[in-house]
Image (cartoon, helix red, strand yellow):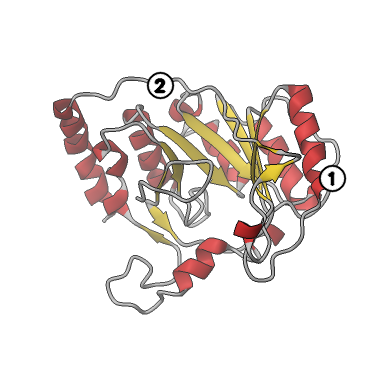
Amino acid sequence: MSDNSKIEWTDATWNPVRGCTKISPGCTHCYAETFAERFRGVPGHPFEFGFDLRLVPEKLAEPLRWPKSKMIFVNSMSDLFHEKVPDEYIEAVATVMAKANWHTYQILTKRAERLRELLAGKLRFAAKLPHVWWGVSVENKQHGLPRVSLLRASPARVRFLSIEPLLEDLGEFNLTGIDWIIVGGESGPGARPMEAAWVRKIRAQCREASVAFFFKQWGGVRKSEHGRVLDGRTYSEFPDRELVAVPEREERLEMLSETVPMELAFA
């Protein structure tokens, strides 16, 4: 886990799964794959096996070791709902999130069908937790907007959309039940352009539906040159957070001792 994430809308990242596979146009220039493949074959490196999907059970208990409240992006280097991640392992991740409730968790997936299925079933215990936010990625109308409908049909307490990279004008779409929207352009080599009119249209819909709006970046080959100012201001809105007190060290150690067998079960 990184406790100093450079991602603008989170504080930290937690990766109990590493690696993924592409399923839609939003994956074309995947930053996580580009990073991971740089280290393929480096003995002992976390990404020694590049972007091949791997469970990392020794990372399961990490949030329990953090004594300060954080917003945590879960699996910034993977997709928790990838078809090769067992249901039981996803349950284990959700169990840790339920225990370490002094953090806020941001789970993002492109596999919205499985998200809906598990939140209605094996993950029902975590679906309505106010400190666990469930989200889907949206890049275009064809692949992204159907995920929004599946998310809205999921029994989640807090729902959000990461509309990055925004690849086209999404038009009008239903924001009922959505609490937060992040918008951003693609960055890095080969970045596909994003038009300001597309962003403004989403911002207007957020205002009309009272949805928190976070503008992450304009993107581009050199994203730092373009920044994240939209029409003269920076948008860094979040849903309301229900913070709870961090347990004393002894209580956290007890939680850790209960979680270690779970780590060993998947080792």
- Residue at horizontal 61%, vertical 35%? 160
Q: Answer above or below: position of 260 versus 143.
A: above
Q: Position of residue 110 (x, y in %)?
A: 61, 49
Mark sitting on residue 125 = none
Q: Nearer the viewer, residue 173 or 2?
A: 2
- Residue at horizontal 38%, vertical 68%? 47
Q: Amino acid at mark 2?
A: Leu
Q: Helix or strand or loop: what does disc 2 sit on?
A: loop
- Residue at horizontal 72%, vertical 47%? 144
Q: Answer above or below: position of 101 versus 225.
A: above
User: In the shown orientation, is residue 211 left or right of residue 142?
Assistant: left
Q: Helix or strand or loop: what does disc 1 sit on?
A: helix
User: In the shown orientation, is residue 111 left or right of residue 97?
Assistant: right
Q: Earlier in the sequence, mark 2 or mark 1?
A: 1
Q: Amino acid at mark 1?
A: Ala
Please give the count of numbered marks on the rendered protein: 2
Residue holding disc 2: 243
Q: Position of residue 22 (x, y in %)?
A: 61, 63
User: In the shown orientation, is residue 205 left or right of residue 93?
Assistant: right
Residue holding disc 1: 197
User: In the shown orientation, is residue 147 left or right of residue 66?
Assistant: right
Q: Residue furthest bottom?
A: 41
Q: Nearer the viewer, residue 222 or 198?
A: 222
Residue 46, quarter of the rendered image:
bottom left
Disc 2 from disc 1: Cα separation:
36 Å
Q: Position of residue 76 (x, y in %)?
A: 48, 52
Q: Nearer the viewer, residue 168 or 236?
A: 236
- Residue at horizontal 69%, vertical 52%? 218
Labels 2, 1: front one: 1
Is disc 1 surrounded by few (<14), some (14 to 19) or many (20+) residues within 10 Å? few
